[in-house]
Amino acid sequence: MMRLPFIVLLQLILFTACAQPQTESEWLSENTSELKTTEGYDFSSIKKAIGNKRIIALGESTHGLGEFYAVKSELVRYLHEELGFEVLAMEGGLGDINLSYYDIDTISASNLRDYSVFQNFRAKEADPLFEQIKTKSNTKTPLHYAGYDTQFSSNYFLTKLQRLVEPIDQEMADSLFVRAYSFQKSFGAARNGDSIGYIKHRDIYINNSNAARQLLLDHRNELFEQKKVTQKEFSIMIRTLEMFSRSVDLTFAKRNEGYVLRDKLMSENLFWLIDEIYPTKKIIVWAHNAHIEKANLEGANIKWMGHFLKEKYKDDYYALGLFAYEGEVYQHWTQNTLPFKNDQDNAIEKKLTDTGKELTFLDLLKLEQLPENQWLFEPIDGYELENGGIISFIPTKRFDGVLNIKESGSPTYEH
C-alpha cells in the first residue's frame, strides 16, 4: 500500500476543510461591511460598490426614523467630498427646493431646511446636511440642491408666486393659496370616494395652476425687465405649475392612479435635472425605498420612479435600499410614534442584524448565486411603514445594495 507523503496528506486535509460550504451566517459575516466606527462612519465599501456610477439613489424604508436622516446626511457629505458627487436631488417640491436654494445667500441653513422639504424631513438629525449645503454654497465645490416632486413641500414656491402675481392680478394673488390647497381637498375626497368633491377640487387646482402659468408667460418680458425674476427662477416656476396641473389630471375612476402618475412625473423632473440642468455632474437622489427601487415588490406590476431611472441610465444607476431592525418610527400622517421590531426569521433586517454589525452594508451587484446566499435571489420580507408594513421582495432584483441599521428612534423635531 502506497503511503502519501506527509506534506501531500496535510494539503489534502486543508483543501477538504477549505472546501466545506459556508453557512448562510458565515457568508453574510464575510460579505457584509460594518459602516459604523468608533470615530464615525467608514463608507469605503460603498465607494468600492458604486465605482464610477453617475447616479446613486439613497432609499429609506420609512420617512420616520432619525438615524436614517443622520446616516444619509453623513453619506451625502462623503459622496460629495470624497467621490465628487455635485448634486443632491431630494424628495421635495420642485419649486420649493430649487427656489429656496437659489436664495441660499439670504437664508440660514435651518431656514433652507424648513423652506424646502416636507415637515417630516425637518428633523435635527438632518441639520448637518443643510449646514453642508449652506457652507459649501459659496465655495468652488458647492453641493447643488434640487427638488423633483410634483407636490409642494412648503409654502416657499407659492409665496414667491403670489408676490409676482400680486401687482398684475390682485384677485388671483388673493385666492392663490386657497385654490392651491384644493390639492389636499381633492386627495381627501378621492380617498373618501366623494366624486363630486374630487372633481370640484381637482378642477380648481388645475385651473389655478394653468391660469398662474399663463399669467407668467404673458408677462414674461416685463418681469425680466423689472428684474422681478431670473431666467432660472422663471423656468422653475413654469415647470412647477405645469407639474401641478398634470399631477391631478385624472378622472374619478382613475383617481387611485395618482401615486403612479406622481412617480412618472418625478422621473421626468429627474431626467430634466440630470440631462439638461446638470448634464455633466454626478447626482445623489434621496427618496423612499419605493421610489428608488429598480424593480417591483413581489406580486406588484407598477412602474415607479426608480424603474424609469434604471431603464434610462442602466449601469450608471445604483439603487441603495435602507432598512432598520427595531426602534420607534414616526408615522407622519397620524403624528404618532410606533414601536417596531422585524425579528421574524425571513426578515432581511434580522438576517443583516444577526451579523453582529450595527450598520450593515451588503453590495448585491454581480453576486454569484450560491447555496449560502440563495435567499437573496428569492422573496424575503422587510418592513416599510409607508408601504403598509411587512412587504415581500427579491433583494437582488429590487436593489443594487442594501444597508441595515440595527436600531433607531423617531426623528427629533423642534416644534
Image (cartoon, rainbow, N blue to C red):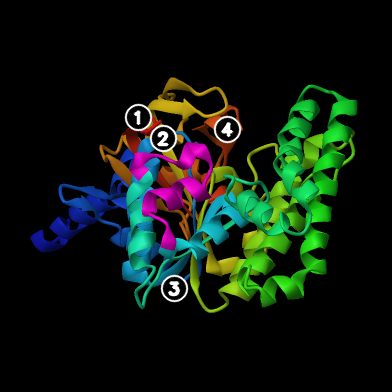
Q: Which of 165 and 182 is in front in this view?
A: 165
Residue 298 left/right relative to 88: right
Q: Which is more foreground, mark 3 or mark 4? A: 4
- Label 3 secondary element: loop
Which residue type does callout 3 highlight? Asn
Number of numbered discs visible in the structure rendering: 4
Residue 117 painted magenta: yes
Q: How far apart are marks 1 and 3 (CA)?
A: 34 Å
Q: In which quarter of the image is the N terminus?
A: bottom left
Image coords of residue 380 (percent x, y): 53, 35
Label whose residue precedes the other's in the sequence (1 or 2): 2
Residue 45 painted magenta: no
Which residue type does callout 2 highlight? Leu
Mark 2 — residue?
65
Mark 3 — residue?
52
Image coords of residue 140 (percent x, y): 36, 78
| Type of secondary structure dominating the magenta stretch | helix
Q: Which is more foreground, mark 1 or mark 3? A: 1
Circles 4 and 2 in contact, beta carbons < 8 Å: no
Badge number at residue 409 = 1
Badge number at residue 386 = 4
Within 10 Å of disc 4 (Cα), the crowding (few <14, some 14-19, many 20+) is some
Q: Give the range drawn in magenta.
A: 106-125
Image coords of residue 158 (percent x, y): 65, 49
Seen in the picture, residue 82 relative to 407 is either above or below; the reply is below
Q: Which of 215 and 350 is in front in this view?
A: 215
Which residue type does callout 1 highlight? Gly
Residue 278 left/right relative to 348: right
Label whose residue precedes the other's in the sequence (3 or 2): 3
